[in-house]
Image (tube, helix red, strand yellow):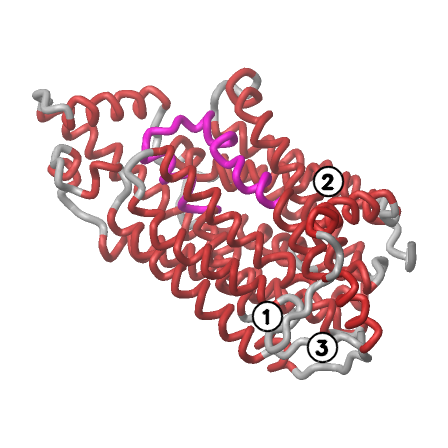
Amino acid sequence: MTNKFKLSFWQIWNMNLGFFGIQFSFGLQQTAVNPIFSFLGADHAQLPLLNLAGPVTGLIIQPIIGAISDKTWVPGWGRRKPFFMIGAIIASLSLFAFPYSSELWFAVGLLWILDVGNNTAMEPYRALVADKLPEEQLTYGFQMQSLFVGAGITIANFSIFLFQDWFSHHDIASEICDPTSAMVSGIPTWVYYSFFLGAVASMGTILWSVIKTPEIPPSEKELEILKRNNDIPFLKKATAPILEIIGAIADMPKLLKTLSVVYLFQWYALFIYWQFITPMLRTSIYGISNNDILKFETIKALCMSGSVVSPADLEFAEGIQRLSEQALSQTGLMNGTYNLVTMIVALALVPLAAKFGNKLVYVSSLFLTGIAMLVLPFIQDEILLLLPMILLGIGWATIMGVPYSIVSKVIPNERRGVYMGIVNMMIVVPMFIQTVTFGPIIHNLLNDNPVNAILFAGGSFMVAGVLAIRLNTSESNI
């Protein structure tokens, strides 16, 4: 690849803007998808397994797309940008369709398609930053991505909070028993608008980055290598990315191996938080028990079947539905708050990392996030719940930027795409483990209580912080 030149603020801004759309989509996944599953009748102990799409598609799609994009050059488009657009189209269509889910299986299927789209765009975007920026701007570039991570998820979550206030129906009881109502699916109509906004944001911002950001063209030598790769038989070409991933894992720098253990606890905990924060709020703030949920589902089923339901039962069902919507709205406010903090501190972390080192900033952020999660279940005031979100926002800004800056300095340019995919595998493998293990854990060991789930996540972050102290950031090559 030709020499890299320092880019201006606006060039880095335009290059990363598409991350806003991708993260708007992820914001909806983090906050709204699991409550939608609950509205469609899922028990909270089922939520981990219902989220299997994220880790599986991330594990398969991102490293393969990364390896393929390393060996791609489309004249007029580039190396990474074709994958942005494919992912944006898939994600936008899925977001538009998602709130129309009438059955749990349909919503779960759409989540798989949505994750395929987001993961197709995600890894090449990470690699583009490393492709374009010289080493002295890498931290700045990845923290700019963190800014857009925060911005996308913030707007997604605040839209949920505001739309619930602006557009929620007051006569919920009549909708519960109206076969023509959108409430038949259990999904409040005001949730639709956030997903429509996300569909527009995903396509629009990625298109802006594609138009505004030229990629660095390959050298004559690189073009010759790419041409030889195109002449390889299809079967061999299809298996080459998998073999390259295996080889890259075998050659993986020691720093990445150490980081993978930290990531095991860090991302396991984050997936718990995203799945169980709304169920926790339903229990800790709004006082809804598992028995209340079962009674609500029974009343709704009787009502929709045409059976006579007493006014007292209708009033009870209306109360549970309203409180559940408030819990989702409160989750939107809280998650929007921590991502707003992420926006504010993302670029401020650049001089802090330069002064104190990436490792110290990263370790500190893990402990701060752990503290935030450990105190959440004990706060009974909706406004005071926003205070731990400040700590979580600082941690999220660091998690989404600093580790990428650390690993970018120890991976070779010619394998940057595949190694960024492997870093994502280090994220999705813990998520996969969580989806298949945490349902039995909460059911059998944590008293089927979402409050205990959040405490478990806080403890996992503390373990991650201790393990991160072992990172040797002085490593410079493999």
Residue at the spot of label 2: 464
Query: Residue visible at 20% across and 43% down?
Result: 182
Query: Residue visible at 53% across and 24% down?
Result: 439
Callout 3 amino acid: Ile
Nearer the observer, disc 2 or disc 3?
Answer: 3
Callout 2 amino acid: Ala
* Residue 280 placement (x, y as % from top left): 45, 34
Horizontal side of residue 214 vs 288, given as left or right: right
Q: Quadrant of the N terminus?
A: bottom right
Horizontal side of residue 203 vs 460, given as left or right: left
The answer to whether residue 40 is magenta is yes
Residue at the spot of label 3: 216
The residue closer to the viewer here, 277 or 133, is 133
Q: Secondary structure at mark 2?
A: helix
Q: Quadrant of the C terminus?
A: bottom right
Residue at the spot of label 1: 16
Ranked by sequence position, the earlier of labels 3 and 1 is 1
| Label 3: few (<14), some (14–19) or many (≥20) C-alpha neighbours in 10 Å | some
**Cα separation between marks 1 and 2:** 28 Å
Confirm or deny contact between disc 1 and disc 2 (CB under 8 A). no
| Magenta highlight: main SS | helix
Segment tinted magenta in the rendering: 30-58
**Cα separation between marks 2 and 3:** 37 Å
**Cα separation between marks 3 and 1:** 16 Å
Does residue 346 lie above or below 44 as drawn?
A: below
